[in-house]
Amino acid sequence: MNIKPWQRIEFLPLAVMGLMALTRLFHFGSAFSLPDASLAVFFLAGIGFSSLWFFALLLLEAVVIDYLAITQFSVSDFCISPAYICLVPTYAVMWFAGRYCKAHKSLSFVDSLKTFGLAVIATTGAFVISSGSFYIFSGRFGQLSWNQYLTQTTQYYPPYLSAALIYIVIGLAIVKLWKATAIAVAES
């Protein structure tokens, strides 16, 4: 089989790590930057890479990027608080949901629908963990009631969910094209 260098599987971890590095500096995106792809990176890495070492490497990369963003690029450190450690279970939800989706990796319509549904559930769980832990542990909300907090944070849920899902769908489409290309190359 004649595989081009960019089609080699060894480059996929670099691709997902590169995506996180390119998008994590500015979490919500702007006219000049894409929204953060970290949730999708952990989900897609869970599908593609079983090693918990890779999960740990992605966590380390996220911390290094945040450190550089704050110290070198003047990004606000508002989100850095005792709640920051809760990003580990937040990303673990995405990683393990991705690992579960390995069973649906044929990418048929039904399997894709199952994967998309689980991505919605996992992203929602990740949102609850990250925003809830920030409310409880950050010390930034004073006397704000749960109702007031929920009213303020629900505005962040649609962009949080949509950014993750867009990246996941694009990632899965790339994988499907990758597989189709590999099959076509193998048949020729």
Image (tube, helix red, strand yellow):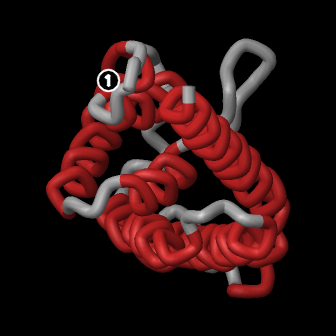
* Number of disc labels: 1
Which residue is located at x 66 percent, y 61 percent? 107
Residue indicated by mark 1 = 68
Q: Residue 88 in the image: x percent, y percent? A: 33, 65
Q: Quadrant of the N terminus?
A: top left
Determine which quarter of the picture holds residue 161. Answer: bottom right
Q: Residue 135 in the image: x percent, y percent? A: 55, 73
Judged from the image, the secondary structure of the residue bearing numbered disc 1 is helix
Determine which quarter of the picture holds residue 149. Answer: bottom right
Which residue is located at x 52 percent, y 62 percent? 140
* Front-lying residue, 46 or 124: 46
Q: Position of 180 compared to 140: left or right?
A: right
Q: Position of 114 compared to 18: left or right?
A: right
Q: Does the image show residue 36? A: no
Residue found at the far bottom of this picture: 146
Q: Quadrant of the C terminus?
A: top right
**Disc 1 residue type?**
Leu
The image shows residue 140, relative to residue 173, as above or below, that is below
Q: Does the image show residue 12? A: yes
The image shows residue 185, relative to residue 144, as above or below, that is above
* Front-lying residue, 50 or 79: 50
Q: Position of 65 compared to 143: left or right?
A: left
The image shows residue 77, relative to residue 69, as above or below, that is below
Which residue is located at x 43 percent, y 24 percent? 7
The image shows residue 18, relative to residue 156, as above or below, that is above
